């Protein structure tokens, strides 16, 4: 790699880790960084984007809008997930690594067990958080229709330093309200998450291989790490967010009765919204399918393709990951965090 490398969404959770690992392991490569503060959609913001990517040897797109609420902002999802990719394609001919989501190949009904890379459109009728998944899928399609050398990395939910909006921060916020982390569900099912630093390193490795011409012209790869797959409480939340000041609740709340009550309330509010505007309230409520994925469903993926296509590398140890993450969440100001489901653009 000679550089410069353009990193878009450089202040996102993954973007910050990607910047850090490039600066640490490739200090001689110039980085051009674009952040959401540069804006999207007006003349000046387009100029700043073009200035960032025009001379880039490679573009890494970590920028996205994520809205997993019951009243998603369709305009924001379209602008930041679809039109943004179209603007990149108009403004540069450089190869692209595009960050997508494993949600695009998820069913909210059938278990998603050890799934390898699949065509996202096969899941469209059962997508969780449909508006978000549709916008991410359309971005992938736009990218591949361009005949550009591109690698799409589908990633699960992330955690780690710089995380301010994930299921882990949801637990932190809940503990701030209730005095402890709510204990919901029977600890069955599986929900896959990954440490942002490990995923960032795989983004770097994909960049190296893409520039070497090791991939097909268009490639989709699911990327994860060695975070144990299973109950999200035992494998992530308790490991990194629980501490003496933030204990787990001693009371176990059954998930399914609460889920069906929430589902009924949600349907009622959606019906009311057709007559009276309650979209502001709905935008603060998580899509029921997201709750089902986290607390009850089976959702984990086959990452053998990334193992085969990316160079051999050593991941950060579980002990290191847990310590770094625990330090971050222990010092976190609960008033600064956001929910994992409300609109966030980064």
Image (spheres, grey):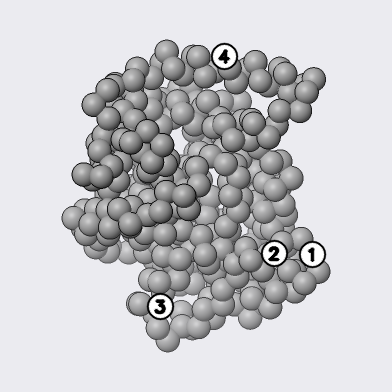
Q: Where is residue 162 in the image (x, y as percent from the top left)?
A: 42, 59
Q: Where is residue 147 in the image (x, y as percent from the top left)?
A: 66, 59
Q: Where is residue 191 in the image (x, y as percent from the top left)?
A: 36, 35
Q: Distance between the residues labelled 1 and 4?
A: 41 Å
First-in-chain label (4 vs 2)? 2
Q: In which quarter of the image is residue 171?
A: top left
User: Do residues under tags 4 and 2 come within 8 Å of each other at their CB atoms?
Assistant: no
Please identify the quadrant where the C terminus is shown: bottom right
Look at the picture and state if 152 lies above or below 68.
below
Q: In this view, does 52 lie to the left or right of 308?
A: right
Q: Residue furthest bottom?
A: 28
| Crowd band around label 3 with a 10 angstrom C-alpha radius: few (<14), some (14–19), many (20+) | some
User: Do residues under tags 1 and 2 come within 8 Å of each other at their CB atoms?
Assistant: yes
Q: Is residue 21 visible?
A: yes
Q: Which of marks 1 and 4 is in front?
A: 4
Q: Nearer the viewer, residue 97 or 197?
A: 197
First-in-chain label (1 vs 4)? 1
Q: Distance between the residues labelled 1 and 3?
A: 31 Å
- Image point (53%, 76%), residue name: 5
User: Do residues under tags 1 and 3 come within 8 Å of each other at their CB atoms?
Assistant: no
Q: Nearer the viewer, mark 1 or mark 3?
A: 1
Q: Which of 246 and 28 is in front in this view?
A: 246
Residue identified by numbered label 2: 39
Residue identified by numbered label 4: 264
Q: Can residue 209 be seen in this view?
A: no
Residue identified by numbered label 3: 23
- Image point (46%, 28%), residue name: 291
């Amino acid at each position: 790699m000679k550089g410069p490398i353009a990193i878009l969404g450089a202040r996102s959770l993954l973007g910050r880790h990607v910047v850090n690992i490039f600066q640490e392991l490739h200090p001689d490569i110039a980085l051009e960084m674009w952040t959401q503060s540069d804006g999207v959609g007006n003349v000046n913001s387009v100029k700043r984007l073009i200035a960032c990517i025009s001379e880039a040897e490679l573009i890494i797109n970590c920028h996205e809008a994520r809205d997993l609420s019951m009243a998603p902002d369709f305009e924001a999802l379209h602008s930041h997930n679809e039109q943004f990719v179209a603007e990149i394609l108009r403004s540069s001919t450089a190869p692209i690594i595009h960050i997508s989501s494993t949600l695009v190949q998820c069913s909210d009904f059938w278990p998603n067990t050890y799934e390898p890379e699949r065509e996202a459109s096969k899941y469209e009728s059962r997508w969780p958080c449909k508006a978000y998944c549709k916008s991410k899928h359309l971005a992938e399609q736009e990218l591949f229709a361009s005949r550009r050398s591109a690698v799409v990395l589908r990633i699960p939910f992330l955690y780690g330093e710089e995380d301010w909006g994930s299921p882990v921060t949801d637990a932190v916020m809940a503990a701030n309200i209730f005095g402890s982390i709510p204990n919901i569900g029977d600890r069955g099912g599986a929900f896959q998450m990954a440490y942002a630093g490990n995923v960032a390193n795989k983004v770097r490795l994909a960049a190296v291989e893409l520039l070497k011409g090791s991939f097909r012209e268009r490639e989709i790869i699911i990327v994860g790490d060695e975070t144990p797959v299973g109950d999200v409480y035992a494998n992530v939340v308790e490991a990194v967010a629980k501490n003496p000041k933030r204990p787990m609740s001693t009371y176990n709340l059954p998930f399914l009765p609460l889920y069906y009550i929430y589902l009924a309330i949600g349907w009622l509010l959606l019906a009311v919204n057709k007559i009276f505007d309650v979209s502001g309230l709905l935008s603060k409520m998580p899509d029921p399918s997201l709750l089902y994925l986290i607390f009850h469903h089976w959702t984990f993926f086959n990452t053998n393709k990334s193992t085969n296509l990316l160079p051999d590398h050593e991941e950060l140890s579980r002990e290191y990951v847990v310590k770094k993450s625990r330090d971050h969440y222990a010092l976190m100001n609960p008033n600064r965090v956001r929910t994992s489901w409300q609109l966030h653009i980064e």
